[in-house]
Image: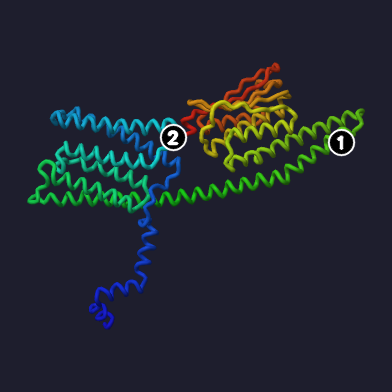
Amino acid sequence: MGTGLAFSSATHGDMRELLKRWGAPQMAEKAGSAFGVNDWTLNLVDPDGLRYVTRVLVWVHWFMGVALLLVLVYRPGYGLGRTVGFGLALLLFMACNAWLHHRLASGRTPTWRWIFAMYWLDVAMISFAAVLGGGFSHYFFHLVYYPVLAGFAVFFSSFRLNMAFVTAVAGVYLILSLTVGDGIDLEAREEKPLLVRILVMYVVVACVNLVSRFERVRWRAAVERERELQRQRVEISQTIHDTTAQWAYMVGLGIEGALDLVDESDHALIEKLRLVAALSRSAMWELRHPIDGGQIFRGEMLGEVLESHAATFTAITSVPAALEQRGQEPPLSIIHKSLLFSIAHNALTNVIRHAEARQVVIGLEYTDDELRLSVSDDGMGLPSDYEARGHGFRNMRADAERMGGILDVVSDSNGGGTTVTCAVPCRTLRGGD
């Protein structure tokens, strides 16, 4: 009872002091941080996510442009001035969207400034269309604001920035509703639906932004897990290089030394030692897959990794191997580089085991349309049933199909050599357009 009297008689200064003593400002700050409402961070989307969101935005813009064009053609009675103004605005809108689409098609990642400008251009176009449609009296133009606000909330992570954006949009719509056409009829209580429309704008932005931030947190956790896995792969490759690979190399040297010491008349022993030496070289080569492949997870370019792998192939087999690269390597994901590396490694493994080749050439060609990886040898060729013998070619074909590419094998069983080629469209390497 006394506590209630104390509260009822407290001044505003006393109330602030009590709230400060209880840590209310700190609690509010922590709550705001938990929900991400205290920062002005513009964007927390990874490059692939950024391209995906931008791609969706581009196609939504094309749909909006066609819809607005149909409105202009279907309802031509706006007068010459309005029609010309609307046509010029629509032309600017389509030109900006075409430029953004061109950046995506050319493989360049758009900047947040252009995305920010495109959202404001959306608002301008919708508002202009609302003016032509009569402002508040039009029954659907306000609905077009909602997907624009939702898209902004998905792309930009800052809660404060989203609140500022939706406030600006709500202000624009409020001014249009009050000044365009007949305005609002207070006697008919049209201010209520107007306030509800504006309130829904805030609700849409708040809900979508909070869900988007939650998904970003999950994405960042997945990225951290993937980075940890990559670190472990690099450590494993280094451990194999420092231990097992060294032992296999010493075993191979010992076998080759034994071959030099054995009596030449003991053909059976020589044949067994040669077989063991071949198995030793094959084992050393298989160990190079995780060792050289570990360079991919350290951020090396695919061409650099394949060049190092070719040098390793030459050192192990004494068969000259070289990389011939044409074109500039585009940004490739770790998954794509790993799959292409595995295809090259498996093709070289077949050379070691079956080809009896004198030289090998690894081709890596980049064009505007596709990436081509090839492994060519001048060996004895493949038998007609080569795909049924083991899993090597099936694995290579499966890796190529995972990237949206194809695997082609050309071989001359009369000693004309073999060429294994993997062709992958660039649009699949970029995640599609």
Nearest the viewer among 425 and 123 is 123
Q: Secondary structure at mark 1?
A: helix
Q: Nearer the viewer, mark 1 or mark 2?
A: 2
Residue at point 40%, 52% (across, down)? 214
Mark 1, other Cα within 10 Å: few <14 / some 14–19 / many ≥20 = some
Left or right: where 262 falls relative to 347: right
In the displayed structure, would residue 410 be above or below residue 330?
above
Residue 406 visible at all: no
Left or right: where 5 falls relative to 317: left
In the displayed structure, would residue 201 be above or below residue 339?
below
Q: Secondary structure at mark 2?
A: loop
Left or right: where 157 falls relative to 264: left
* Residue assigned mark 1: 258
Q: Quadrant of the C terminus?
A: top left
Nearest the viewer among 268 and 209 is 209
* Residue assigned mark 2: 108
